[in-house]
Amino acid sequence: MREPQENPIKEAWILCLVLGLIMINFPFIHIFNTVTPVFGIPGLVLYFFIGWPLSILVIWIFVHQMEKKPRNHSTPEDRKEL
Amino acid sequence: MTPEDSNLLSAMVSPKTVFLVSLSYFVLLFLVAYYADHRKRQGRSLLQKSHIYTLSIAVYCTSWTFYGSVGRAATSGLEFLPIYLGPTLIAFTWWFLLRKMVYVSKQQNITSIADFISSRYDRSALLGAIVTIFTVFGITPYIALQLKAIAHTLGLLSLPIGAAYPAIQDYAGNLPPGTDTAFFVTLLLALFGILFGARHLDTSERHEGLVVAVAFESLIKLVAFLAVGIFVTYGLFDGFGDIFQKFFETFPDRANLFNLGTEQTPYTKWFSLIVLSMMAVMFLPRQFHIMVTENSDPQHIKQAMWRFPAYMFLINLFVLPIALGGLIMNGGDTSQADYFVLTLPLASGHTGLALLVFVGGLSASAGMVMVSAVAIATMILNHLVMPIILKLNMHVQDMSGLLINLKRVNILGVIFLGYFYFRVIGDSYALVNIGLISFMAATQFAPAVIGGLYWKRANCKAAIAGISCGALIWFYTLLVPSFVRSGWLDSDILQNGLFGIGLLKPLELFGLRGFDIYTHCLFWSMLVNLGAFLTISFFARQKESETMQAHKFVDTTTEIQALPGRLKRISKAPTVVEFVELMSKFIGEKPAQAAISEFINQQEIDARGSLSDLEIPHLKSFTERTLAGHVGAAPARIILENYLSARGSEMEDVFDIFGTVTISHASSREQLSVLYDAAQIVSRGEDLQKTLDNILALLAQQFRFDLCVIRLLEPETETLLVKSLVGQSSDHFGESERNLNMETYIGQAFLSNQTIVINDTEYLDKPTSARIIKRENITCFAHTPVILDGQPIGVLSAFSRTVKGIFTKEFVALFENMARQVAIAWRNDQQLQEVLHVREQEREMQIAKEIQIGLLPATLPKSENFQVAGLCVPAHQVGGDYYDFIKRGRCIYDLVIADVSGHNIGSALIMAETRTFIHARLDGIKQPAAMLQALNDYFLKDLDRSELFVTMFYLQYHADRQTLTFSNAGHNSPLLWKQYQQKMTKLDAEGLIFGIKKDVSFEQKVTQLEPGDLLLLYTDGIVEAENSNHEFFGMERLEKLLRESEGQEPQEIIDRIMNQVRMFTGMRHFNDDITMLVMKVLS
């Protein structure tokens, strides 16, 4: 059986995916689509190269949280595999 | 340093050096791969480390990334980014999507994306073939692009600086003429692929060497790219800000490179590229191969979720600086922008760095080529070659050698097909854009894969239609325009559409215009693909086998054992050895043996260590999965199906009573239905033999027993006799009786009153039974006692010669219930027999009664001297009372009244005997006393034996003299009413009842009668007639009645007495026989 903790995690991941899709697409990125550079660097470039590591950080935090209580997220197959 | 300065430096790298470096790098790769394999053999697999997994996924970054990103950035600005942002986004889903794909693939031994899709959709060979063909067309050219990159960079390295960049045909630079470096590289890569990707046939077994080598390559390409990035950013320029500033200063007109929503990069295109890359990173065959097939531990996905995006971030961090730096240093010339990564260090004289970059690029290409070649070769072997091989129906003992060689040939073939593409279409538009074209192809698999993982209704027809339609649109709206731009097709089709139909313009299909080629293709292909997939899934029905597969894919996180649906078993099932032989044929003997021992170890089989009938289907699935790991799911299915059908074996439904708890609802229904049938048979009330035969027939038919027997106890001989038998049996086995002892299982079942189940006859502990069972080839059997009122009356047995382990707990319950039905049938029959018996007895008693009545005087003599009447009313059909009135001489009459104790047939017989004796000896014995004496002697033996006794009063009336001579043998004293004296006297004489002792002397008395006297002879039935208060009718009442009967005729007196007795007892029936004889003396 799917463990109860599994679904909130899955929902959180999907939420991140949807948020991510919004944040790297029109119209959201249109905000940063300026001609004037910020600190000498074009707005969109700056946005992506700051946003990208931040999103990786978000994944890392999530994964780290899951690692903390691995039992809650491992299915029987996981344990078998391990 | 200015670009001009750098051009002055002679930075040529000698071809020898390039060759040596390349060769050394390949040797290093071989060593790394070899080391990984070595570690694995030692049991210290490098794949245990999750970062190896992450690095291997980075095979996503090919030379298209390594060199191409910079090129794209230089020409189109930010357009290079979506290819990496997409995978970062999709990584959010890996914890459930990728992990699920990995689980399913592990469970199903899936070897490739084609195998995955085919396996999900009823293991359809057609679907596998479609996906494979699509892949070969859409993705193999990508290999050409990698080969091109290697060849081109080799050429660049060996060119003197300042020389014009060569056309593609002259890429070889100053290498010796005729040197086809690409060919050598292709050969090396093929060799590597074969060595590390096709050592064994089992693709589901991981290729450690290949994966670790790919991971190593990923590391090299990252290091190389970072090195050159840092060199350009901080060596040639002064950081990011400096580059951007210089770029803006030099090319102010190109500032929109960093903007989106431009003509170059509209938002729609941006979005499309993100979607394409999201799908490509999941469903490109090489990605699937590395991420799913080669995954050693699903837990690694967790780390890969952030590490892989981080890898992509790092490798892209310096793309813009290098691109801009290249543009600045090359005066804005973008023609060679794809190779800025290499030319910038070269131009600045850093040959070492350039060599590192070359090696990085080589890594990016080689990794992709090797993995793709292995993945595609596997797909071709399993989905294109295997079906043909199976069609040919070759009778080869061991095909594994052939198959592995075919796979090697395929790898070689795939890589050289790439080489062929490279040679033929070289620098064409089609090849340059093959990256995104192949992404689009991989995207077509997305609905079938994702839908198949989360939507059970998704079915085979829908997947075939979806992928085919998607592929068609892909071809028409993406490939055809590429061909036109490459000059292979007339541009007329682009201008006017197919057959001149405007709506069919490949770039403006059905009038949809204003979009770039990728968005246009993505929209139409996904619309058609998803549309067909969803619609057909909704309306088409799945086959049962397809539903099972769907369940295995969708519900993978639940226990696989708890599958719903009907369980199957195999008729004429192959043995374990035969399964091993079958596997050996395709995968070789050793792997087959290893696989089967693994299976046996995993099975929680009974302590006896053999497989039950119900585990054979598991073994079949296991065999299929194992074969699938080598040849793919669809061929594996075909192999198994062909094999089983050739044997005449069939998968057949088994009653779900064998199932697990989860299907107990269904099971109880099945169980009830069988019991209901059995109860129906019993209730039909046919004769016992027929009923038992029918119950056994039902049992044998429903559960396919070879023999079913009912034995019932024969109480006299204490043996179990065969009552009914269905199935094949030899004389000695099923039909013979069984003694009741604990030496046989059947005896044990009966005596212990418990069911005995032997699920595997290999292991028996009763030598007597074991001998018989072995002779009869019985594989499993059960005995259950037939119990009536807690006592066993027989045994129900079932035997199977073909299957083992049929008697599960659930089945035994049903089996015992069947035995109960047998008991009910038996009891019904017993009761019926009893009723019949009683009826028969009644009929016999009726006859006896009639005979007995016939023995009494039918008419009593009439005389002017006396009147006489008699009555005998037996308490039951027959009785022991007897009276007689015999004319002895002219005026001599003998009156007899007798009472045999009891009122049964024995009494009646004695009574008949008495009468016969008297009538026979009448002439010889003249006196009452003598008659009694003779009777006593005669009866002594008979009565003693029968424990009966007889009382008798014997009188002789001389009518002429009116004297009454009488003797008594213990009988009730007759009453004599002397009318004249108005006095009641009792006639009595000494004498013992018959049968007590020999030589009894009977007193004989004589009395004189007078006219009007009444003589009443009676039996004790009258005086001992009892009323509800337990009072006897008694002598007093009788005497009174007789006294009051003066003047009445004998018959009237008898009737009156009878009436009075009846009234007294208040019953129609009496407890004892009643007999009276009344004589009235007349004149």
Image (cartoon, rainbow, N blue to C red):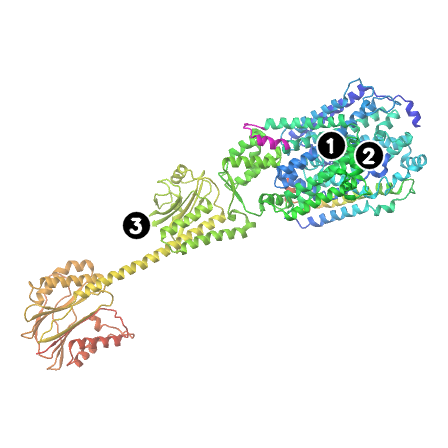
Tag shown at residue B69: 2
Question: Is B492 inside the magenta-drawn segment?
Answer: no
Quadrant where the N terminus of chain B is found in the figure: top right
Circle 1: element type: helix
Segment tinted magenta in the rendering: B384-399
Q: Amino acid at mark 1?
A: Ala
Q: Is residue B860 left or right of residue B111?
A: left
Q: Is residue B365 left or right of residue B716?
A: right
Q: CA distance from mark 1 to mark 2?
A: 20 Å
Q: Nearer the viewer, residue B1032 or B330?
A: B330
Look at mark 1 in the image and give the residue it sits on.
B215
Q: Amino acid at mark 3?
A: Glu
Compare marks 1 and 2 and give the one earlier in the sequence. 2
Q: CA distance from mark 3 to mark 1?
A: 85 Å
Between disc 1 and disc 2, the foreground one is: 2
Whole-percent x and y of residue B41? 64, 29
Whole-percent x and y of residue B197? 67, 29
